[in-house]
Amino acid sequence: MTMELSDAQLVGRCRNGDAAAWNELVERFSRYVYAIAVRAYRLAEHDAEDVFQDVFARAYERLGSLRDDAAIRPWLAQLTRNACVDRLRSAAREQPEEEPSAEETDAMLERLDEALDVHDALDGLSTDCREILDRFFARDESYRTIGEALDLPAGTIASRISRCLGKLRENLEGRKPDPDPSGGL
Amino acid sequence: MSATSGYDEERLGELLSALPPAPAGWVRAAQELPAARLGLDEIVERARVDSEFRVRLVADLETALAGAGYEPTDELIEAVRACLPELDQ
């Protein structure tokens, strides 16, 4: 898929049985569903995995019932919340444990929504910038690991991160970045 | 977009850190759902119209699936049992 499809276009294609679109939909929302399970509801990995598969299985089965294709994100968030709550309640029957409060999960979900907006804005950056920012912040890789993976001197990674964050901020604030003959770094 | 101002480097870093990648195996399994469902649909349909295949499934589900060219994963076996409860009778 060469051109970035909107969420609504992607859902439409999935509904028509386009396997590549389904792959893209899972890729696009996998971090979001995962973060809701492990960060907002603090599920253990094995429970989070069950929730993750359950959410995408339900999404696949029920895509036809989604009334507004553009609302796939809040719909997936709700499916994930429901699956997490079911999982926590089922676990609590065996070993009572305190559930995160609704206020806590609401605040975290708001933050994850904003995080997904920022993550989506990475698409407007060069491949190198996307890779560097994702490796450093989301994958928690060291300067050395990033330098080795991207064949860049480790001593330049910090300044590259700073420049890429500047470009990301410009994208988010809707300003056109200056032309960059270096290809983004 | 929830907010378009106030994105200093620290805040952007925090937001980028909030979405680590899901384990690759989980993502792959979710992406393979349509193909897995297609395989399941085929098995269920064949079991309904092909009595010999159905007899083999009842006798030994795992071997019958493998013999018919399907990888008899635990998930597939469980899904076939769920769709064809008569196999357990």
Image (cartoon, coloured by chain):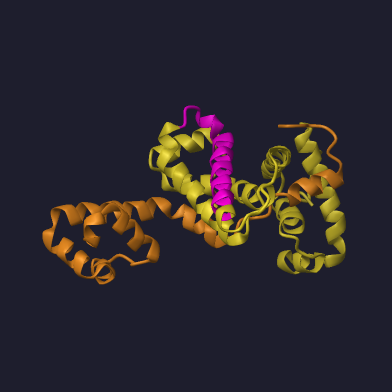
Left or right side of B17 for A93: left
Query: Which residue sits at x=43%, y=55%?
Result: B32
Left or right side of A2 for B39: left
Q: Residue furthest top?
A: A67
The one of B67 and A124 positioned closer to us in this rendering? B67
Query: Which residue sits at x=38%, y=65%?
Result: B74
Residue A104 in percent (x, y) is at: 73, 41
Q: Which chain is orange?
A: B
**Is residue A3 at least partly visible in the picture?**
no
Colour given to chain A in the rendered image = yellow
Q: Does the magenta stretch mainly form a helix, a strand or a loop?
A: helix
Residue A19 part of the magenta segment: no
- Dividing the picture into quarters, in which one does residue A85 lie? top right
Q: Is residue B61 above or below residue A41?
A: below
- Dividing the picture into quarters, in which one does residue A78 lie? top right
Residue A9 in percent (x, y) is at: 50, 34
The one of A109 and A96 positioned closer to us in this rendering? A96
Query: Which residue sits at x=62%, y=46%?
Result: A32
Residue A81 part of the magenta segment: yes
Query: Which residue sits at x=77%, y=42%?
Result: A168
Residue A91 in percent (x, y) is at: 57, 55
Left or right side of A82 for A39: right
The one of B18 and A88 positioned closer to us in this rendering? A88
Left or right side of B30 for B38: left
The one of A75 and A105 positioned closer to us in this rendering? A105
Which region of the structure is painted magenta?
A66-91
Q: Is residue B83 above or below residue A82?
A: below
Q: Residue furthest left?
A: B51
**Is residue A150 at least partly visible in the picture?**
yes
Q: Is residue A138 above or below residue A125?
A: below
Q: How many marks?
A: 0
